[in-house]
């Protein structure tokens, strides 16, 4: 499956699938998570205090008993201090979990070993896994080292939005100034290279960034001339990363749940109402299915309980019976002959003909578990045999 997602970033706020961030009576977002975030459980809608939460009572002594039993297995004494003695009587967690895209500006300093950016180093190692599709990630040249020799703009997309990986060729990034589209980048070659398909002549057609599909990471190296090249027609006076600058791909996504170098969300950052951005892509998720083969063999399944299976001219005898002093017998009922003939209004010799419209799935005790409706009824005579391939989606 390929679910489609659209993120729009405006005035340092994220909008998911163009849905408005609706405030509640008790919170900034009625779903109980920060605006621009997807609620993973959708519990505690517009609540303050007394939240629904998972918990375990310390009185149950479950973890304490397990720890003591483990010590006893290792030859230690079973008695001892309670490892949870300093905790309250109830151990709980929270359902207010959320996810959204984040932007992180990685400042690279290669002058000393202690100043290396570990996040950038991890991304660089991941790039090596894409050498087979992205020729710029090969180790035979210094292109990959050059990418991380200067600052890097990174957009992180959690896996809950794309599943196994972002679908190759589905990424579209748009850069707007005062509502006007000034540049677009796509992975049109399906190799992870984000190519500018619309923009100034000096940038259009150039690689401005890269995508790591399985990790959900988009990054724009400042060492690229196209990434730090000006793409606006005039100086809009927008503040990016603490300084006024022209619109550049190195600034793409600014304000989207900004993170610092330590990975913590930045709660206070400059707002800019002139620049806005959109990220559109499709995910790739795999659904577990069970495949079953149901056989309709020759000479089988050639009787039907449908009343039309019998000759209606003998309807008076249907359901009739004959009794004697010691006998009981049902009346013989003729099966309707619907065998087709090659002659107009002709009647062929009698053959049992049924139409299979449903398939039943039974367990070992002959209990009906489910029925499958076929796309169309299948005509079956005694000489025919069919095999129906059925796929069942496992939750």
Image (cartoon, rainbow, N blue to C red):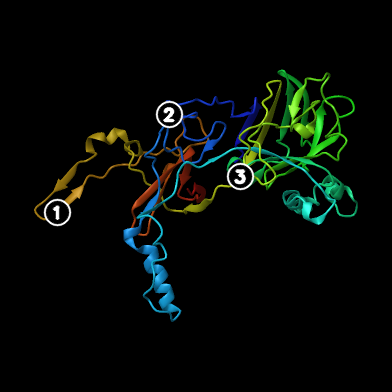
Circles 3, 2 touching at the beta carbon (< 8 Å):
no
Give the mark, 2 or 1, whose residue is nearer the N terminus: 2
User: Which disc, if any, is residue 233?
Assistant: none
Q: Which residue is denoted by mark 1 in the rendering?
A: 327
Task: Using the numbered discs, state the Cα–Cα distance from disc 1 to disc 3 in whole angstroms.
Answer: 73 Å
User: On the image, numbered disc 2 is attached to which residue?
Assistant: 26
Q: Choose mark 3 or mark 2, whichever is in front.
A: 2
* Neighbour tally class for label 1: few under 14, some 14-19, many 20 plus, Cα within 10 Å: few
Tag 1–tag 3 contact (CB < 8 Å): no
| C-alpha distance separating marks 2 and 1 | 81 Å
Direction left: furthest residue: 325
Q: Is residue 171 left or right of residue 60?
A: right
Q: Residue at x 53, y 34 (%)?
A: 34
Q: What is the quadrant of the N terminus in the image?
A: top right
x, y percent for residue 45: 42, 33
Tell me, for residue 159, which label it has, or none: 3
| Distance between mark 3 and mark 2 Cα atoms | 30 Å
- Give the mark nearer the N terminus: 3 vs 2: 2
* Residue projecting furthest to the bottom: 75
Residue 176 is situated, as x and y percent measured from the top left of the image, at 73, 23
């Amino acid at each position: 499956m390929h679910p489609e997602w659209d993120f729009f970033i405006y005035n340092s706020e994220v909008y998911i699938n163009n849905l408005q961030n609706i405030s509640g009576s008790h919170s900034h977002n009625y779903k109980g998570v920060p605006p621009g975030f997807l609620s993973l459980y959708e519990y505690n809608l517009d609540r303050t205090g007394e939240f629904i939460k998972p918990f375990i009572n310390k009185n149950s002594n479950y973890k304490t008993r397990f720890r003591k039993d483990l010590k006893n297995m290792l030859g230690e004494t079973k008695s001892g201090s309670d490892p949870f003695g300093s905790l309250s009587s109830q151990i709980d967690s929270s359902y207010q979990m959320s996810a959204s895209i984040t932007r992180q500006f990685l400042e690279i300093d290669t002058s000393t070993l202690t100043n290396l950016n570990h996040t950038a180093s991890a991304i660089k190692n991941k790039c090596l896994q894409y050498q087979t599709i992205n020729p710029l990630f090969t180790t035979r040249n210094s292109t990959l080292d050059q990418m991380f020799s200067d600052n890097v703009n990174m957009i992180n997309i959690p896996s809950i939005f794309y599943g196994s990986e972002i679908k190759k060729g589905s990424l579209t990034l748009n850069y707007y100034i005062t509502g006007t589209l000034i540049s677009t980048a796509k992975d049109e070659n399906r190799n992870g290279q984000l190519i500018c398909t619309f923009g100034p002549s000096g940038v259009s057609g150039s690689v401005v960034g890269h995508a790591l599909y399985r990790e959900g990471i988009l990054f724009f190296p400042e060492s690229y001339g196209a990434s730090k090249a000006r793409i606006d027609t005039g100086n809009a006076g927008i503040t990016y990363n603490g300084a006024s600058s022209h619109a550049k791909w190195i600034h793409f996504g600014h304000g989207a749940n900004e993170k610092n170098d330590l990975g913590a969300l930045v709660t206070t950052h400059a707002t800019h109402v002139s620049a806005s951005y959109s990220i559109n892509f499709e995910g790739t998720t795999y659904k577990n299915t069970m495949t079953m083969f149901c056989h309709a063999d020759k000479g089988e399944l050639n009787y039907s309980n449908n009343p039309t299976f019998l000759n209606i001219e003998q309807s008076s005898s249907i359901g009739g019976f004959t009794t004697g002093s010691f006998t009981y017998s049902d009346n013989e009922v003729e099966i309707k002959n619907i065998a087709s003939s090659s002659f107009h209004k002709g009647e062929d010799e009698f053959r049992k003909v049924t139409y299979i419209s449903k398939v039943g799935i039974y367990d070992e005790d002959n209990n009906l578990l489910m029925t499958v409706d076929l796309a169309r009824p299948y005509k079956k005579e005694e000489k025919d045999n069919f095999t129906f391939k059925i796929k069942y989606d496992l939750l």
